[in-house]
Image: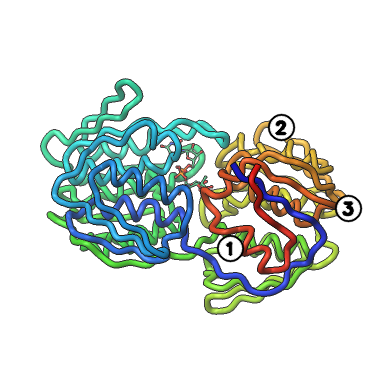
Protein backbone atom coordinates (compact mmCIF):
# COMPACT_ATOMS: atom_id res chain seq x y z
CA UNK A 1 0.00 0.00 0.00
CA UNK A 2 1.13 3.60 -0.55
CA UNK A 3 1.03 6.71 1.57
CA UNK A 4 1.27 10.33 0.50
CA UNK A 5 3.47 12.74 2.47
CA UNK A 6 2.70 16.47 2.25
CA UNK A 7 4.84 19.21 3.79
CA UNK A 8 2.66 22.25 4.40
CA UNK A 9 3.37 25.91 3.77
CA UNK A 10 3.80 26.18 0.01
CA UNK A 11 1.65 28.54 -2.04
CA UNK A 12 0.39 26.84 -5.20
CA UNK A 13 1.10 28.67 -8.45
CA UNK A 14 1.02 27.66 -12.10
CA UNK A 15 -1.24 25.62 -14.34
CA UNK A 16 -2.97 22.25 -13.97
CA UNK A 17 -4.98 20.27 -16.55
CA UNK A 18 -8.03 18.27 -15.55
CA UNK A 19 -8.58 14.62 -16.43
CA UNK A 20 -11.82 13.17 -17.76
CA UNK A 21 -14.72 12.72 -15.36
CA UNK A 22 -14.81 9.41 -13.45
CA UNK A 23 -18.54 9.77 -12.77
CA UNK A 24 -19.21 10.36 -16.45
CA UNK A 25 -16.92 7.64 -17.81
CA UNK A 26 -18.30 4.84 -15.62
CA UNK A 27 -21.95 4.92 -16.79
CA UNK A 28 -20.83 5.65 -20.37
CA UNK A 29 -18.70 2.48 -20.30
CA UNK A 30 -21.77 0.53 -19.17
CA UNK A 31 -23.87 2.18 -21.90
CA UNK A 32 -21.52 0.77 -24.57
CA UNK A 33 -22.94 -2.67 -23.70
CA UNK A 34 -26.28 -1.61 -25.23
CA UNK A 35 -24.87 -2.28 -28.70
CA UNK A 36 -23.02 -5.28 -30.16
CA UNK A 37 -20.84 -2.82 -32.09
CA UNK A 38 -17.55 -1.27 -31.02
CA UNK A 39 -17.45 2.05 -29.13
CA UNK A 40 -14.40 4.24 -28.55
CA UNK A 41 -14.37 6.58 -25.56
CA UNK A 42 -11.71 9.27 -25.15
CA UNK A 43 -10.40 11.13 -22.07
CA UNK A 44 -11.19 8.21 -19.77
CA UNK A 45 -9.09 8.91 -16.64
CA UNK A 46 -6.57 6.33 -15.44
CA UNK A 47 -8.18 5.45 -12.08
CA UNK A 48 -8.76 2.38 -9.92
CA UNK A 49 -12.52 2.63 -10.46
CA UNK A 50 -12.03 2.64 -14.24
CA UNK A 51 -9.82 -0.46 -13.96
CA UNK A 52 -12.52 -2.13 -11.84
CA UNK A 53 -15.15 -1.34 -14.46
CA UNK A 54 -12.89 -2.71 -17.21
CA UNK A 55 -12.53 -5.98 -15.24
CA UNK A 56 -16.31 -6.11 -14.76
CA UNK A 57 -17.02 -5.54 -18.46
CA UNK A 58 -14.52 -8.25 -19.42
CA UNK A 59 -16.26 -10.63 -16.99
CA UNK A 60 -19.52 -9.88 -18.85
CA UNK A 61 -17.86 -10.94 -22.10
CA UNK A 62 -16.92 -7.59 -23.63
CA UNK A 63 -13.45 -7.10 -25.13
CA UNK A 64 -11.99 -3.93 -23.62
CA UNK A 65 -8.66 -2.25 -24.35
CA UNK A 66 -7.37 0.91 -22.68
CA UNK A 67 -4.52 2.96 -24.08
CA UNK A 68 -3.50 6.42 -22.92
CA UNK A 69 -7.03 7.48 -21.80
CA UNK A 70 -8.75 5.95 -24.86
CA UNK A 71 -11.02 3.01 -24.15
CA UNK A 72 -12.16 0.64 -26.91
CA UNK A 73 -15.13 -1.57 -26.04
CA UNK A 74 -16.23 -4.51 -28.19
CA UNK A 75 -19.34 -5.91 -26.47
CA UNK A 76 -19.85 -8.65 -29.07
CA UNK A 77 -23.04 -10.56 -29.88
CA UNK A 78 -23.52 -12.42 -26.60
CA UNK A 79 -23.03 -11.12 -23.07
CA UNK A 80 -22.77 -13.00 -19.76
CA UNK A 81 -25.50 -11.22 -17.75
CA UNK A 82 -24.01 -11.89 -14.30
CA UNK A 83 -21.93 -9.25 -12.46
CA UNK A 84 -20.05 -10.98 -9.63
CA UNK A 85 -20.02 -9.95 -5.97
CA UNK A 86 -16.22 -9.70 -5.82
CA UNK A 87 -16.22 -6.84 -8.34
CA UNK A 88 -19.51 -5.10 -7.53
CA UNK A 89 -18.69 -5.01 -3.81
CA UNK A 90 -15.57 -2.92 -4.50
CA UNK A 91 -17.38 -0.27 -6.49
CA UNK A 92 -21.02 0.75 -6.19
CA UNK A 93 -21.07 2.26 -9.67
CA UNK A 94 -20.94 -1.33 -11.03
CA UNK A 95 -24.70 -1.30 -10.49
CA UNK A 96 -25.06 0.73 -13.69
CA UNK A 97 -24.51 -2.37 -15.83
CA UNK A 98 -27.96 -3.54 -14.72
CA UNK A 99 -29.88 -1.37 -17.17
CA UNK A 100 -27.79 -2.17 -20.25
CA UNK A 101 -27.72 -5.93 -19.52
CA UNK A 102 -31.48 -6.03 -18.94
CA UNK A 103 -32.20 -4.04 -22.11
CA UNK A 104 -29.72 -5.94 -24.29
CA UNK A 105 -30.23 -9.55 -23.14
CA UNK A 106 -33.59 -9.47 -21.29
CA UNK A 107 -31.89 -10.63 -18.08
CA UNK A 108 -29.39 -9.24 -15.56
CA UNK A 109 -27.98 -10.71 -12.37
CA UNK A 110 -25.95 -8.16 -10.43
CA UNK A 111 -24.73 -8.41 -6.87
CA UNK A 112 -26.37 -5.92 -4.54
CA UNK A 113 -23.79 -3.16 -3.99
CA UNK A 114 -22.73 -2.99 -0.36
CA UNK A 115 -22.90 0.21 1.60
CA UNK A 116 -19.75 2.21 2.08
CA UNK A 117 -18.34 4.66 4.59
CA UNK A 118 -20.48 7.50 3.25
CA UNK A 119 -23.81 5.75 3.72
CA UNK A 120 -26.09 2.77 3.06
CA UNK A 121 -26.51 3.62 -0.65
CA UNK A 122 -29.66 1.69 -1.53
CA UNK A 123 -30.74 0.98 -5.12
CA UNK A 124 -34.51 0.92 -4.62
CA UNK A 125 -35.04 3.67 -7.21
CA UNK A 126 -33.06 1.75 -9.83
CA UNK A 127 -35.28 -1.30 -9.24
CA UNK A 128 -38.46 0.79 -9.18
CA UNK A 129 -37.53 2.11 -12.62
CA UNK A 130 -36.84 -1.34 -14.08
CA UNK A 131 -40.14 -2.69 -12.71
CA UNK A 132 -41.96 0.28 -14.26
CA UNK A 133 -40.42 -0.77 -17.60
CA UNK A 134 -41.93 -4.22 -17.16
CA UNK A 135 -39.02 -6.16 -15.64
CA UNK A 136 -39.57 -8.77 -12.95
CA UNK A 137 -37.17 -8.12 -10.04
CA UNK A 138 -36.08 -10.74 -7.50
CA UNK A 139 -33.44 -10.43 -4.80
CA UNK A 140 -31.88 -13.78 -4.00
CA UNK A 141 -28.66 -14.62 -2.14
CA UNK A 142 -27.47 -11.01 -2.35
CA UNK A 143 -28.08 -10.70 -6.07
CA UNK A 144 -30.59 -8.60 -7.98
CA UNK A 145 -32.16 -10.79 -10.70
CA UNK A 146 -33.98 -8.65 -13.26
CA UNK A 147 -35.86 -10.30 -16.09
CA UNK A 148 -37.84 -8.76 -18.96
CA UNK A 149 -40.68 -11.31 -19.29
CA UNK A 150 -41.42 -10.33 -22.88
CA UNK A 151 -39.72 -7.05 -23.68
CA UNK A 152 -39.24 -3.75 -21.84
CA UNK A 153 -42.08 -1.27 -22.43
CA UNK A 154 -41.88 2.51 -22.03
CA UNK A 155 -43.64 4.08 -19.04
CA UNK A 156 -43.91 7.24 -16.92
CA UNK A 157 -41.51 6.86 -13.97
CA UNK A 158 -41.12 9.12 -10.93
CA UNK A 159 -37.56 8.70 -9.58
CA UNK A 160 -37.58 11.28 -6.79
CA UNK A 161 -36.67 10.47 -3.20
CA UNK A 162 -36.68 12.31 0.12
CA UNK A 163 -33.14 13.53 -0.74
CA UNK A 164 -34.01 14.73 -4.25
CA UNK A 165 -32.89 12.75 -7.28
CA UNK A 166 -30.51 9.87 -7.87
CA UNK A 167 -27.67 10.19 -10.40
CA UNK A 168 -27.01 6.53 -11.18
CA UNK A 169 -30.68 5.55 -10.92
CA UNK A 170 -31.47 8.17 -13.57
CA UNK A 171 -28.66 6.87 -15.76
CA UNK A 172 -29.55 3.21 -15.27
CA UNK A 173 -33.24 3.66 -16.12
CA UNK A 174 -32.45 5.98 -19.03
CA UNK A 175 -30.12 3.34 -20.49
CA UNK A 176 -32.72 0.57 -20.12
CA UNK A 177 -35.42 2.77 -21.69
CA UNK A 178 -33.40 3.38 -24.88
CA UNK A 179 -34.28 -0.16 -26.11
CA UNK A 180 -37.75 -0.39 -24.53
CA UNK A 181 -40.82 -0.37 -26.80
CA UNK A 182 -42.51 3.03 -26.75
CA UNK A 183 -41.92 6.21 -24.80
CA UNK A 184 -40.48 6.56 -21.30
CA UNK A 185 -40.74 9.73 -19.24
CA UNK A 186 -38.49 10.01 -16.19
CA UNK A 187 -39.81 12.58 -13.73
CA UNK A 188 -37.56 13.98 -10.99
CA UNK A 189 -34.50 12.90 -12.99
CA UNK A 190 -31.02 13.91 -11.76
CA UNK A 191 -29.67 16.98 -13.59
CA UNK A 192 -25.95 16.40 -13.01
CA UNK A 193 -23.58 17.12 -15.95
CA UNK A 194 -22.61 13.43 -15.88
CA UNK A 195 -26.23 12.47 -16.66
CA UNK A 196 -26.19 14.95 -19.54
CA UNK A 197 -22.91 13.46 -20.80
CA UNK A 198 -24.38 9.95 -20.69
CA UNK A 199 -27.43 11.14 -22.65
CA UNK A 200 -25.15 12.71 -25.28
CA UNK A 201 -23.26 9.43 -25.67
CA UNK A 202 -26.50 7.44 -25.93
CA UNK A 203 -27.75 9.86 -28.58
CA UNK A 204 -24.54 9.28 -30.57
CA UNK A 205 -25.37 5.55 -30.35
CA UNK A 206 -28.75 6.33 -31.97
CA UNK A 207 -30.91 6.69 -28.86
CA UNK A 208 -33.89 9.09 -28.98
CA UNK A 209 -33.51 11.19 -25.82
CA UNK A 210 -34.59 14.72 -24.89
CA UNK A 211 -34.74 16.81 -21.72
CA UNK A 212 -31.42 15.65 -20.21
CA UNK A 213 -30.17 18.18 -17.65
CA UNK A 214 -33.76 18.91 -16.61
CA UNK A 215 -35.88 16.98 -14.06
CA UNK A 216 -37.93 15.50 -16.95
CA UNK A 217 -36.21 13.24 -19.47
CA UNK A 218 -38.08 11.66 -22.40
CA UNK A 219 -36.79 8.53 -24.15
CA UNK A 220 -38.36 7.03 -27.30
CA UNK A 221 -37.25 3.39 -27.47
CA UNK A 222 -35.47 2.15 -30.62
CA UNK A 223 -34.84 -1.38 -31.92
CA UNK A 224 -31.06 -1.23 -31.97
CA UNK A 225 -28.18 1.02 -31.02
CA UNK A 226 -24.86 1.27 -32.86
CA UNK A 227 -21.33 1.84 -31.57
CA UNK A 228 -20.09 5.43 -31.17
CA UNK A 229 -16.99 7.54 -30.57
CA UNK A 230 -17.16 9.98 -27.66
CA UNK A 231 -15.04 12.20 -25.41
CA UNK A 232 -16.16 12.46 -21.79
CA UNK A 233 -16.39 15.82 -20.02
CA UNK A 234 -13.64 16.89 -17.61
CA UNK A 235 -13.97 16.04 -13.94
CA UNK A 236 -15.79 18.84 -12.11
CA UNK A 237 -14.95 17.39 -8.70
CA UNK A 238 -11.25 17.19 -9.51
CA UNK A 239 -11.61 20.81 -10.72
CA UNK A 240 -13.24 21.88 -7.46
CA UNK A 241 -10.51 20.14 -5.48
CA UNK A 242 -7.76 22.14 -7.22
CA UNK A 243 -9.79 25.33 -6.83
CA UNK A 244 -9.82 24.72 -3.07
CA UNK A 245 -6.09 23.92 -3.04
CA UNK A 246 -5.34 27.31 -4.64
CA UNK A 247 -7.77 29.10 -2.29
CA UNK A 248 -6.37 27.52 0.88
CA UNK A 249 -2.71 28.11 0.07
CA UNK A 250 -3.27 31.72 -1.09
CA UNK A 251 -1.96 30.70 -4.48
CA UNK A 252 -2.68 31.68 -8.08
CA UNK A 253 -3.65 28.72 -10.26
CA UNK A 254 -4.97 28.35 -13.80
CA UNK A 255 -7.09 25.20 -14.30
CA UNK A 256 -7.26 23.98 -17.90
CA UNK A 257 -10.13 21.96 -19.45
CA UNK A 258 -12.44 23.39 -16.77
CA UNK A 259 -16.16 23.87 -17.51
CA UNK A 260 -17.08 26.97 -15.45
CA UNK A 261 -20.82 26.37 -15.92
CA UNK A 262 -20.46 23.07 -14.01
CA UNK A 263 -19.00 24.90 -11.02
CA UNK A 264 -21.55 27.61 -10.21
CA UNK A 265 -22.33 26.44 -6.66
CA UNK A 266 -18.64 25.91 -5.80
CA UNK A 267 -17.62 29.25 -7.37
CA UNK A 268 -20.40 31.00 -5.44
CA UNK A 269 -19.11 29.63 -2.13
CA UNK A 270 -15.48 30.47 -2.91
CA UNK A 271 -16.43 34.03 -3.89
CA UNK A 272 -18.34 34.34 -0.60
CA UNK A 273 -15.12 33.23 1.15
CA UNK A 274 -13.22 36.08 -0.51
CA UNK A 275 -11.40 34.11 -3.21
CA UNK A 276 -11.09 35.78 -6.62
CA UNK A 277 -12.09 33.70 -9.66
CA UNK A 278 -11.76 34.50 -13.35
CA UNK A 279 -13.71 32.40 -15.84
CA UNK A 280 -12.54 31.65 -19.36
CA UNK A 281 -14.02 29.49 -22.14
CA UNK A 282 -12.55 26.27 -20.72
CA UNK A 283 -10.31 27.61 -17.99
CA UNK A 284 -10.68 28.94 -14.46
CA UNK A 285 -8.14 31.10 -12.63
CA UNK A 286 -8.26 31.03 -8.82
CA UNK A 287 -6.43 33.52 -6.62
CA UNK A 288 -6.51 32.75 -2.93
CA UNK A 289 -5.94 35.32 -0.22
CA UNK A 290 -4.45 35.31 3.26
CA UNK A 291 -7.62 35.83 5.24
CA UNK A 292 -10.74 34.04 4.01
CA UNK A 293 -14.25 34.62 5.36
CA UNK A 294 -16.42 31.90 6.97
CA UNK A 295 -19.48 30.71 5.06
CA UNK A 296 -22.20 28.07 5.40
CA UNK A 297 -22.86 25.20 2.97
CA UNK A 298 -25.70 22.74 2.44
CA UNK A 299 -25.08 19.92 -0.01
CA UNK A 300 -27.85 19.35 -2.55
CA UNK A 301 -28.43 17.60 -5.87
CA UNK A 302 -27.11 19.52 -8.90
CA UNK A 303 -27.05 22.47 -9.44
CA UNK A 304 -26.71 22.71 -5.64
CA UNK A 305 -23.39 22.42 -3.82
CA UNK A 306 -22.08 18.89 -4.55
CA UNK A 307 -21.74 16.40 -1.70
CA UNK A 308 -18.51 15.27 -3.39
CA UNK A 309 -17.04 18.68 -2.52
CA UNK A 310 -18.24 18.72 1.10
CA UNK A 311 -15.08 17.28 2.66
CA UNK A 312 -12.87 19.63 0.66
CA UNK A 313 -15.02 22.59 1.77
CA UNK A 314 -14.61 21.46 5.37
CA UNK A 315 -10.82 21.51 4.99
CA UNK A 316 -11.05 25.09 3.72
CA UNK A 317 -13.34 26.16 6.56
CA UNK A 318 -11.05 24.47 9.10
CA UNK A 319 -8.46 27.21 8.47
CA UNK A 320 -10.91 30.07 7.88
CA UNK A 321 -11.25 32.33 10.94
CA UNK A 322 -14.79 32.35 12.34
CA UNK A 323 -17.57 29.81 12.54
CA UNK A 324 -18.86 27.94 9.47
CA UNK A 325 -21.62 25.34 9.20
CA UNK A 326 -21.93 22.39 6.81
CA UNK A 327 -25.25 20.56 6.39
CA UNK A 328 -25.03 17.28 4.47
CA UNK A 329 -28.38 16.54 2.80
CA UNK A 330 -27.27 13.76 0.45
CA UNK A 331 -25.23 11.42 2.70
CA UNK A 332 -25.92 12.42 6.32
CA UNK A 333 -23.09 10.17 7.55
CA UNK A 334 -20.44 11.57 5.20
CA UNK A 335 -18.25 13.00 7.99
CA UNK A 336 -15.43 10.43 8.29
CA UNK A 337 -12.96 13.23 7.61
CA UNK A 338 -13.98 15.19 10.75
CA UNK A 339 -12.00 13.06 13.21
CA UNK A 340 -8.94 13.03 10.96
CA UNK A 341 -9.02 16.82 10.47
CA UNK A 342 -9.39 17.23 14.24
CA UNK A 343 -6.23 15.12 14.69
CA UNK A 344 -4.51 17.87 12.69
CA UNK A 345 -5.71 20.50 15.14
CA UNK A 346 -9.00 21.47 13.50
CA UNK A 347 -11.94 22.35 15.74
CA UNK A 348 -14.94 20.63 14.15
CA UNK A 349 -18.04 19.31 15.90
CA UNK A 350 -20.41 17.09 13.93
CA UNK A 351 -23.76 15.75 14.99
CA UNK A 352 -26.20 13.88 12.70
CA UNK A 353 -26.02 15.62 9.31
CA UNK A 354 -24.43 18.87 10.50
CA UNK A 355 -20.87 20.00 11.26
CA UNK A 356 -19.84 23.22 13.03
CA UNK A 357 -16.34 24.36 12.14
CA UNK A 358 -14.41 26.83 14.32
CA UNK A 359 -11.60 28.01 12.04
CA UNK A 360 -8.08 27.79 13.47
CA UNK A 361 -4.97 29.78 12.54
CA UNK A 362 -2.87 26.77 11.65
CA UNK A 363 -3.27 23.01 11.40
CA UNK A 364 -0.44 20.72 12.43
CA UNK A 365 0.80 17.92 10.23
CA UNK A 366 0.01 14.39 11.46
CA UNK A 367 -0.36 10.80 10.25
CA UNK A 368 -4.00 10.46 9.10
CA UNK A 369 -6.13 7.73 7.57
CA UNK A 370 -7.99 8.11 4.29
CA UNK A 371 -11.53 6.74 4.30
CA UNK A 372 -13.73 7.62 1.35
CA UNK A 373 -12.39 9.07 -1.88
CA UNK A 374 -13.27 12.71 -1.19
CA UNK A 375 -12.32 12.63 2.49
CA UNK A 376 -8.85 11.57 1.34
CA UNK A 377 -8.66 14.64 -0.90
CA UNK A 378 -9.66 16.85 2.03
CA UNK A 379 -6.77 15.45 4.10
CA UNK A 380 -4.31 16.24 1.30
CA UNK A 381 -5.68 19.82 1.15
CA UNK A 382 -5.31 20.15 4.92
CA UNK A 383 -1.74 18.87 4.65
CA UNK A 384 -0.93 21.59 2.11
CA UNK A 385 -1.48 24.27 4.79
CA UNK A 386 -0.51 22.38 7.94
CA UNK A 387 2.71 22.94 9.86
CA UNK A 388 5.17 20.12 9.17
CA UNK A 389 4.48 16.80 7.47
CA UNK A 390 1.12 15.08 7.02
CA UNK A 391 1.14 11.41 6.09
CA UNK A 392 -2.07 10.24 4.42
CA UNK A 393 -2.34 6.46 4.68
CA UNK A 394 -4.50 4.07 2.58
CA UNK A 395 -4.28 6.28 -0.47
CA UNK A 396 -5.90 3.57 -2.57
CA UNK A 397 -9.10 5.46 -1.69
CA UNK A 398 -7.63 8.51 -3.39
CA UNK A 399 -6.48 6.53 -6.43
CA UNK A 400 -10.08 5.51 -7.06
CA UNK A 401 -10.94 9.02 -8.22
CA UNK A 402 -7.89 11.24 -8.64
CA UNK A 403 -5.50 10.83 -11.56
CA UNK A 404 -1.92 11.49 -10.36
CA UNK A 405 -2.94 14.01 -7.69
CA UNK A 406 0.53 14.16 -6.17
CA UNK A 407 2.13 14.85 -9.59
CA UNK A 408 -0.42 17.54 -10.42
CA UNK A 409 -0.02 19.22 -7.02
CA UNK A 410 3.79 19.09 -7.10
CA UNK A 411 3.55 20.64 -10.58
CA UNK A 412 1.92 23.59 -8.80
CA UNK A 413 4.75 23.80 -6.27
CA UNK A 414 3.41 21.61 -3.46
CA UNK A 415 5.94 19.62 -1.41
CA UNK A 416 4.21 16.25 -1.84
CA UNK A 417 5.42 12.72 -2.57
CA UNK A 418 4.11 9.17 -2.68
CA UNK A 419 5.92 6.50 -0.68
CA UNK A 420 5.49 2.82 -0.02
CA UNK A 421 3.89 2.19 3.40
C1 LIG B 1 -23.27 9.38 -7.68
O1 LIG B 1 -23.50 8.27 -6.86
C2 LIG B 1 -21.77 9.59 -7.64
N1 LIG B 1 -21.09 8.39 -8.11
C3 LIG B 1 -21.32 9.89 -6.21
O2 LIG B 1 -19.93 10.19 -6.26
C4 LIG B 1 -22.06 11.12 -5.72
O3 LIG B 1 -21.70 11.37 -4.38
C5 LIG B 1 -23.58 10.90 -5.82
O4 LIG B 1 -23.93 10.56 -7.17
C6 LIG B 1 -24.38 12.12 -5.41
O5 LIG B 1 -24.04 13.20 -6.23
C7 LIG B 1 -21.05 8.13 -9.43
O6 LIG B 1 -21.61 8.85 -10.24
C8 LIG B 1 -20.29 6.91 -9.86
P1 LIG B 1 -27.19 8.89 -5.79
P2 LIG B 1 -24.96 7.61 -6.85
O7 LIG B 1 -27.96 7.71 -6.27
O8 LIG B 1 -25.64 7.79 -8.14
C9 LIG B 1 -30.11 7.95 -2.31
C10 LIG B 1 -17.66 10.01 -5.71
O9 LIG B 1 -17.07 10.44 -4.71
N2 LIG B 1 -30.59 6.84 -3.12
O10 LIG B 1 -27.33 10.18 -6.52
O11 LIG B 1 -24.85 6.24 -6.31
C11 LIG B 1 -28.72 7.74 -1.75
O12 LIG B 1 -28.76 7.00 -0.57
C12 LIG B 1 -19.01 9.33 -5.57
O13 LIG B 1 -17.25 10.12 -6.89
C13 LIG B 1 -31.69 6.09 -2.71
O14 LIG B 1 -32.23 6.33 -1.63
O15 LIG B 1 -25.67 8.53 -5.77
C14 LIG B 1 -28.26 9.15 -1.52
O16 LIG B 1 -28.78 9.61 -0.29
C15 LIG B 1 -19.38 9.11 -4.10
N3 LIG B 1 -32.13 5.08 -3.50
C16 LIG B 1 -28.94 9.93 -2.64
O17 LIG B 1 -29.95 9.08 -3.15
C17 LIG B 1 -31.54 4.80 -4.71
O18 LIG B 1 -32.02 3.87 -5.41
C18 LIG B 1 -28.05 10.29 -3.79
O19 LIG B 1 -27.48 9.09 -4.25
C19 LIG B 1 -30.45 5.57 -5.11
C20 LIG B 1 -29.99 6.59 -4.31
Q: Is residue 139 above or below residue 299?
A: above
Q: CA distance from mark 2 to mark 1?
A: 29 Å
Residue at the top extreme, as displayed? 141
The C terminus sits in image quarter: top right
Quarter holding residue 82: top left
Depth order, front residue of 312/192: 312
The residue beneath circle 1 is 239
Q: Does residue 373 appear left or right of residue 10 in this picture? A: left
Residue 276 seen anywhere in this rendered image of the structure? no
> Label 2: few (<14), some or many (≥20) within 10 Å?
few
Q: Of 332 and 103, which appears nearest the observer?
A: 103
Residue 157 percent across, percent down from the top left: 31, 43
Residue at 79% in and 44% down: 357
- Label at residue 349: none
* Element carrying mark 3: loop
- The residue that disc 2 covers is 351
Residue 44 percent across, percent down from the top left:
42, 61
Compare marks 2 and 1 and give the one earlier in the sequence: 1
| Circle 2/circle 1 CB separation < 8 Å | no
Out of 140 and 320, give the one closest to the viewer. 140
Q: In the rendering, at what x and y percent does residue 332 appear?
A: 60, 36
Looking at the image, residue 70 lies above or below residue 390: below
- Kindly give the residue lying farthest to the right in the view shown: 361
Q: Point out the frontmost of discs 3 and 2.
A: 3
Provide the residue designation for mark 3: 361
Amino acid sequence: MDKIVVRGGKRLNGEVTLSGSKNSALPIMAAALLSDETSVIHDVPNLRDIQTMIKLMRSLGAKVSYDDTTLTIRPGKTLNPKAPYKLVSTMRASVCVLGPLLARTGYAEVSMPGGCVIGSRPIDLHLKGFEALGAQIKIEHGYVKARALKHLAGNEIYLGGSFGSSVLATGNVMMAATLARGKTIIESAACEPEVVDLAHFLRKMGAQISGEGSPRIEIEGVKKLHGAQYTVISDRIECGTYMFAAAMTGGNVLIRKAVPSHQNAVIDKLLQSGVSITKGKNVLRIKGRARLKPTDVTTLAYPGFPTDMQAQMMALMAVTPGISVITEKIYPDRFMHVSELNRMGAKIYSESARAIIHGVKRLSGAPVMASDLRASAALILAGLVAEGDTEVHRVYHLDRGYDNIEKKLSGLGAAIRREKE
